[in-house]
Amino acid sequence: MRRLKGLVVDWVLLTLFLLMVEFLALSFSGSRGPTGLLVTPEETLDLLHYGWCAALGLLVAIAWQSLRGVRRESPGHALIFGEETDEAIPWTHTLRGWFTALLIELTFLTGWLITEVQLFDFLTQFNKATDIVRGLVAENVFALFLRNAGEVPAQSADVLHQGLVLLVQTIFLAFMATAFAIPVAFAMSFFAARNLTRTTSLSRWMYTLVRAVMNITRSVEPLVWALIFISWVGIGPFAGVLALWVHSVAALVKLYSEQIESIDHGPVEAITATGASTLQVLRYGVVPQVIPPFLSFTIYRWDINVRMSTIIGFVGGGGIGYILKPRVDLGQWGEVGTLVILIALTVWAMDIISAKIRERIV
């Protein structure tokens, strides 16, 4: 089974390697690369064309797995079995080292083309950047206050007032999402810890299920969750709370469970030897060890949610982002600068406070 896993890893890496080689060859030759969505029968046939990469990758993986010796050891073999010798050999003297270096270079070049990086436009379009920066710095309410000797235009004052009100909503939006996530993540983290779910088949299935669900949930950005919940409960801060809550649960389960996996098993074994039940073992052997890092992770997550809640407002999830996006769309950079300064000050204050609390806890 382990050898099969190593073969699968090699197959995937080699197939990706060959796909990127062909993509770069097509791109530099002027032909269409495999970047379009497959929506027509003709394009579907183009996808089948890349099957040769998978077939050739499998053949090369089988051949590479059959070779012996550290200098020709495959990436999958090394990942699953580890090094077969303690002899230190520079990566330049191994086939695996050169393959890894080429794979990284090909990945970078492929990403460069797929994301359409245009450094020349970025470095030469100074006029637009100058107008934006001038508006953000010179036209915000704080700059106007200093320039006009204490007088601020009514429109800028209204933006400042709205921003402060919605900033409070942003902070509490993040707080409520984190508060709702704590009990759910705490309970689920014990099912997602490998060291606590190896005793029975049911616990192992629970581990796999919880991990899979949390990975899927965490892979979806809070912005997408906000759009889903806006369709469910309507536009407003409650949709933002639900979006951040779902993502926070998934993130905290990962952090909590990894901390549980790194506990000292001495107390757990001692309490188990006394005939204690599973709940008693968790209560007296596991929980006391994980509470301080759990609190630190939770505060850190609240800090993250404060930042995320700003973006959640862009799609109608409440908070200061709700009034920030239309001003960005209209190019009202002075008002945008006012709101950005409020957000920056809040995040800066939150970062200092959370850092002090984590220092006290740890």
Image (tube, rainbow, N blue to C red):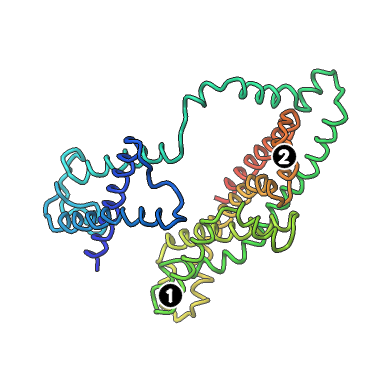
Q: How many marks?
A: 2
Residue 156 picture location, percent across and down: 82, 30
Q: Give the number of the disc on residue 324.
A: 2
> Residue 161 falls in which quadrant of the image?
top right
Circle 2: element type: helix
Circle 1: element type: helix
Residue 340 appears left or right of 199? right
Tag 1 residue:
205
Residue 116 picture location, percent across and down: 46, 36
Residue 22 appears left or right of 134? left
In the rendered image, the quadrant that contains the N terminus is: bottom left
Q: Give the number of the disc on residue 326.
A: none
Residue 98 picture location, percent across and down: 22, 41
| Residue found at x 73% / y 40% | 326
Q: Nearer the viewer, residue 320 or 270?
A: 320
Few, some or many C-alpha atoms within 10 Å of disc 2 (few <14, some 14-19, many ≥20)? many
Residue 224 appears left or right of 259? right
| Residue found at x 70% / y 40% | 325
Image position of 291 with respect to 114: above or below: below
Q: Nearer the viewer, residue 192 or 153?
A: 153
Q: Nearer the viewer, residue 128 or 203?
A: 128
Q: CA distance from mark 2 to mark 1?
A: 45 Å
Image position of 140 with respect to 228: above or below: above
Image position of 345 with respect to 200: above or below: above
> Residue 94 falls in which quadrant of the image?
top left
| Residue found at x 70% / y 58% | 230
Kind of residue at badge 1: Trp
Few, some or many C-alpha atoms within 10 Å of disc 1 (few <14, some 14-19, many ≥20)? some
Between label 2 and label 1, give the one nearer the viewer: 2
Residue 123 picture location, percent across and down: 51, 23
User: Looking at the image, do the residues carrying marks 2 and 1 touch, with CB atoms under 8 Å apart?
Assistant: no
Kind of residue at badge 2: Leu
